[in-house]
Image: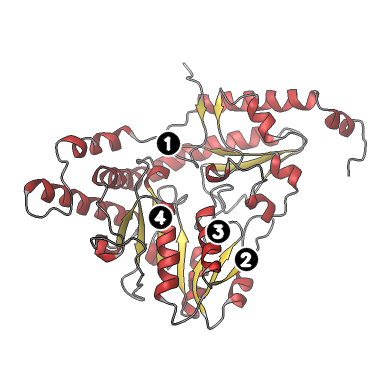
Amino acid sequence: MLQLPVYLDNNATTPCDPRVVAAMLPYFTETFGNAASRSHPFGWAAEEAVDYAREQVARLIGAEPKEMVFTSGATEAVNLALKGVYEMYAGKGNHIITALTEHKAVLDTCRHLEKMGARITWLPVNAEGLIDLQELEAAITPQTILISLMYANNETGVIYPVQAISEIARKHDVLFMSDATQAVGKVPVDVNNDGIDLLTLSAHKLYGPKGAGALYVRRRSPRVRLTAQIDGGGHERGMRSGTLNVPGIVGLGKAAELCMEEMTTDTARILPLRNQLEQALLELELSFLNGSRQHRLPHTCNLSFKYVESEALMMGFNKKIALSSGSACTSASLEPSHVLKAMGLSDELAYASLRFGLGRFTTAGQIAFTIRTITEAVTQLRNTSPIWEMYKDGVDLG
């Protein structure tokens, strides 16, 4: 029997896998030591658990365990990477290149750095949400210290050509950071093959707990150095002080291990469901796919339904289906999606968009129910809309 509400907002957060919860539980009560307490068995056990999780996370992205710095999540990792590079490499330059469609964690941190004296280049994107690589290379100056471009977009699922970006960065001796929060665990990511120098990820996007994340910092070719943003105790090799969240880190490690083992089978099951949902809803008149059809995460689709506002649409089914009209971090804003606006969508179409994020626990029955429910909701709203009636009567609404 179908349980409601159906959850299709896995880009905002994923449910914690029961196997992850089981791995974490002993570290709340039985093995509760501080990983920095190296004078007794409780601390040794906690440190051992953290070290093992570091190996698990490193394996998922092709890194070395010593290159992983544990944080409270991707937002903290982004702040540490951007601010840490800006301060450490101030002697070389103050120029950072990013894109208009980045997550707010990157955009807002770059705006903060602008106030501190940084020069930021904000690259535009095309209608598919992709940057122009020639424009990226042309933006590089002798003062450029960092290129920060996401691996996959959180709203559209569009995947960037990270290897080509890395080649440009390497050619000009510039560090390359990628916010891979949406990609890690969903598609194969390898920091060496991809040529990434700094990478951010978060446990709760890959069926782990909230409050745990990591920053990958390359150790050689080139060796990346950061200025710490949190002082006190010198934890995480001096890059991020603070008592480690051992249960959360154990959960992140277990989640990473499960993603390594099950990514291929998860994708093989989720992709047809995503395509079925997308194909059915695109049969509705004046419905559009936002973003690249080809270069995209397998679990994400972003659709606009012309002459139907997404907020009004969601009001019709939000007790039955959980999804989003944009990033969870900006859902409190009344502004249209900055990602869709950067791609050239009108306010009207940006306001009429819905983001569908399927996941490990999404079922065929849930997708069939979603197709029926949203089709009915769109049809009902349009049937009561004077603007839709005018459109159907052939009135020029331009």
Would you name the residue on which mark 1 appears? 360
Q: Nearer the viewer, residue 334 or 224?
A: 334
Residue 86: x and y in percent read 45, 71
Cα–Cα span, label 3 and label 2: 12 Å
Q: Nearer the viewer, residue 110 or 274?
A: 110
Specify the amino acid type for callout 4. Glu
Mark 2 or mark 1: which comes first in sequence?
Answer: 2
Would you name the residue on which mark 4 appears? 76
Q: Secondary structure at mark 3?
A: helix
User: Which residue does the image show at 70% across and 39% down from the upper left?
Assistant: 352
User: Which residue does the image show at 62% across and 66% down from the upper left?
Assistant: 123
**Contact check, label 3 and label 2, Cβ < 8 Å:** no
Cα–Cα span, label 2 and label 1: 34 Å
Query: Horizontal placement of 385 versus 87: left or right?
Result: right
Specify the amino acid type for callout 3. Leu
Specify the amino acid type for callout 2. Leu
Residue 381: x and y in percent read 75, 26
